[in-house]
Image (spheres, coloured by chain):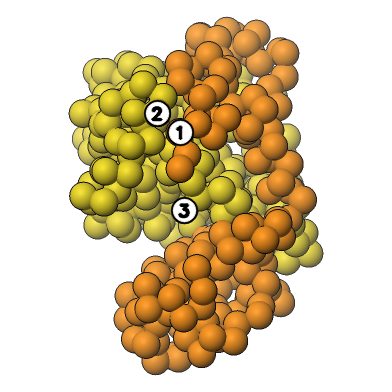
Chain colours: A yellow, B orange
C-alpha cells in the first residue's frame, strides 16, 4: 500500500504523516511512499481553472501507482484522485489518459484510491486493542465535505466511520447531523461568505457540547485552527496518541487544545 | 460547453425544484450561489449567476433526490468562466504556483528540518518527480 500525503501534509502539517506512520507500524500495515508525491491538482480551484491539466495530473499519479492502493491523508486529494480513478475506469477515460501519458513517455495505470478513514476503520479492532491513553474531552466529528463525498462514492459513511474509530481509540465524540463546512473553498475568494460558514460550523460544535473538533481533512484542520481559532485534532493524532505516540506537535496547533 | 449542452449532459430535466440542494448549501445561506437557481437557469439557457461563489463542497450532489450532479454542473460553469479568463485571483495565483514549481503552495526552507525531527524523509519537491515538468508545461494536456 502506498502513502500519498499531499501538499498540505508534506509542507505544512507533517505531523499527520508522522502519526499515520506510527499507527501503521503498530498495526503492521505496510505503507511505502507513493510513486508520485505531487499535487493532486486540488479539486476546488485548480480543477475549475484547468480541467485538462487536472486530467493529466490525475493520469500521471495513477500511472505511477498503477495496480497499487494509495492512501490519501488529505480529503482534497481523496476527492481529486477518486474522481480521476472513476474517470480512468471508463473506456473513454482510459483512452484519454493513455494518449496524454504517451506524450510524456509514461504508461497507463490505475491505482485504488482510499482515504485514511477507510484504512483506520478497516483496522478498528487493532486500534481498540492498542489504545491505552484516550484523549480528554469530547470531540465533534467533522470529516469535511470532500471526504464525505469521496467516501460516499465508495458506499461509505465518513461521519459514522470516524465516530467508530474514535470510539475504538477511547475518545468521546459527538456526531452532528447537520450540513457543516469549513468554508475553505471560498477562502481568499469570498472571505465574508467563507467566514460566515466557518462560524456556523463552530457554533454547531459549541451547541453540541464539544471541546474540540476531530477532522480527517487537513484543509479543515487549518481553517479551524488558524481562521476560527477553535481547538482541533486530526484523527491520526487522536489515534496515534491513544496508542502512546508522544511527539511534540504543539507547533502545529496555533490554537491550544 | 453551452448551457443547452450542459443541461443535456447533466440531465437537468430530472430536477423537480425541491430546493433540497439550496437548503443544504452552506454558501447559499450567506449570499453565495443558489444551486436550484443554477440548475433551473442552465436548464432554461439563461443562467448568469457567479459560479465562483460555490465552495465545491458537493453537498448539493449528495442530497439531490434525483441524483443530479449539481456540483459537477457548477464545475462545468466555472471551467467555462475560466476559459474566458474570468478566474478569481486566489485560484490564478495557486495555478501559477503549480505551473512554475509543481506545488500549489510555497515550501519553507525549514520544512525538511521539521520533517526530520518527526522521523520523516525530506519533502519531495515538485520537479523531482519524473515527467512532472512536462506535465506542468502542458505537454501532457490535449
Q: Residue at x 67, y 27 (%)?
A: B100
What subunit carries mark 2?
A: A
What subunit carries mark 1?
A: B
Circles 1, 2 touching at the beta carbon (< 8 Å): yes
Relative image position of residue B63 (x, y in whole percent): 40, 74
What subunit carries mark 3?
A: A
Foreground mark, 2 or 3, reads 2
Question: Are callouts 1 and 2 both on one chain?
Answer: no
Residue position marked by numbered label 3 in the rendering: A146
Relative image position of residue A223 (x, y in whole percent): 66, 47
Vertical placement of residue A44 versus B30, above or below:
above
Residue position marked by numbered label 1 in the rendering: B140
Relative image position of residue B96 (x, y in whole percent): 69, 37
Vertical placement of residue B122 versus A109, above or below:
above
Neighbor class of circle 2 (other Cα within 10 Å; few <14, some 14-19, many 20+) is: some
Is residue A30 in sight in this rendering? yes
Residue position marked by numbered label 2 in the rendering: A103
| Residue B93 falls left or right of residue B74 | right
Spatial separation of the CA atoms under disc 1 and disc 3? 27 Å
Relative image position of residue B51 (x, y in whole percent): 62, 69
Mark toward the start of the polypeptide (2 vs 3): 2
Amino acid at each position: 500500500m502506498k502513502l500519498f500525503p499531499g501538499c498540505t501534509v508534506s509542507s505544512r502539517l507533517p505531523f499527520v504523516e508522522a502519526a499515520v506512520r506510527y499507527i501503521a507500524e503498530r498495526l503492521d500495515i505496510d505503507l511505502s511512499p507513493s510513486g508520485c508525491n505531487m499535487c493532486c491538482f486540488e479539486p476546488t480551484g485548480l480543477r475549475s481553472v484547468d480541467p485538462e491539466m487536472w486530467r493529466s495530473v490525475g493520469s500521471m499519479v495513477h500511472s505511477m501507482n498503477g495496480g497499487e492502493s494509495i492512501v490519501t491523508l488529505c480529503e482534497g486529494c481523496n476527492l481529486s484522485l477518486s474522481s480521476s480513478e472513476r474517470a480512468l475506469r471508463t473506456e473513454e477515460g482510459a483512452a484519454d489518459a493513455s494518449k496524454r501519458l504517451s506524450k510524456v513517455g509514461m504508461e497507463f495505470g490505475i491505482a485504488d484510491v482510499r482515504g485514511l478513514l477507510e484504512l483506520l476503520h478497516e483496522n478498528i479492532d487493532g486500534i481498540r486493542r492498542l489504545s491505552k491513553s484516550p484523549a480528554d474531552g469530547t470531540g465533534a466529528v467533522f470529516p469535511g465535505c470532500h471526504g464525505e463525498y469521496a467516501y460516499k462514492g465508495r458506499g461509505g459513511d465518513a461521519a459514522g466511520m470516524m465516530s467508530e474509530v474514535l470510539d475504538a481509540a477511547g475518545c468521546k465524540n459527538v456526531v452532528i447531523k447537520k450540513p457543516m463546512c469549513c468554508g475553505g473553498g471560498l477562502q481568499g475568494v469570498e472571505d465574508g461568505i467563507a467566514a460566515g460558514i466557518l462560524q456556523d460550523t463552530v457554533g454547531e460544535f459549541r451547541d453540541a457540547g464539544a471541546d474540540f473538533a476531530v477532522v480527517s481533512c487537513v484543509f479543515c484542520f487549518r481553517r479551524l485552527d488558524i481562521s476560527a481559532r477553535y481547538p482541533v485534532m486530526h484523527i491520526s493524532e487522536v489515534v496515534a496518541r491513544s496508542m502512546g505516540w508522544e511527539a511534540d506537535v504543539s507547533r502545529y496547533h496555533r490554537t491550544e487544545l | 460547453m453551452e448551457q443547452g449542452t450542459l443541461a443535456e449532459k447533466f440531465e437537468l430535466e430530472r430536477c423537480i425544484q425541491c430546493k433540497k440542494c439550496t437548503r443544504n448549501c452552506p454558501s447559499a445561506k450567506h449570499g453565495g450561489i443558489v444551486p436550484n437557481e443554477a440548475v433551473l437557469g442552465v436548464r432554461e439557457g439563461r443562467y448568469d449567476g457567479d459560479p465562483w461563489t460555490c465552495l465545491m463542497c458537493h453537498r448539493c450532489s449528495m442530497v439531490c433526490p434525483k441524483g443530479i450532479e449539481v456540483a459537477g454542473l457548477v464545475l462545468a460553469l466555472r471551467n467555462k468562466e475560466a476559459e474566458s479568463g474570468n478566474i478569481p485571483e486566489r485560484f490564478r495565483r495557486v495555478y501559477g504556483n503549480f505551473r512554475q514549481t509543481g506545488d500549489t503552495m510555497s515550501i519553507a526552507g525549514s520544512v525538511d528540518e521539521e520533517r526530520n525531527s518527526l522521523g520523516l524523509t525530506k519533502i519531495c519537491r515538485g520537479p523531482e518527480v519524473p515527467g512532472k515538468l512536462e506535465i506542468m508545461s502542458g505537454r501532457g494536456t490535449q
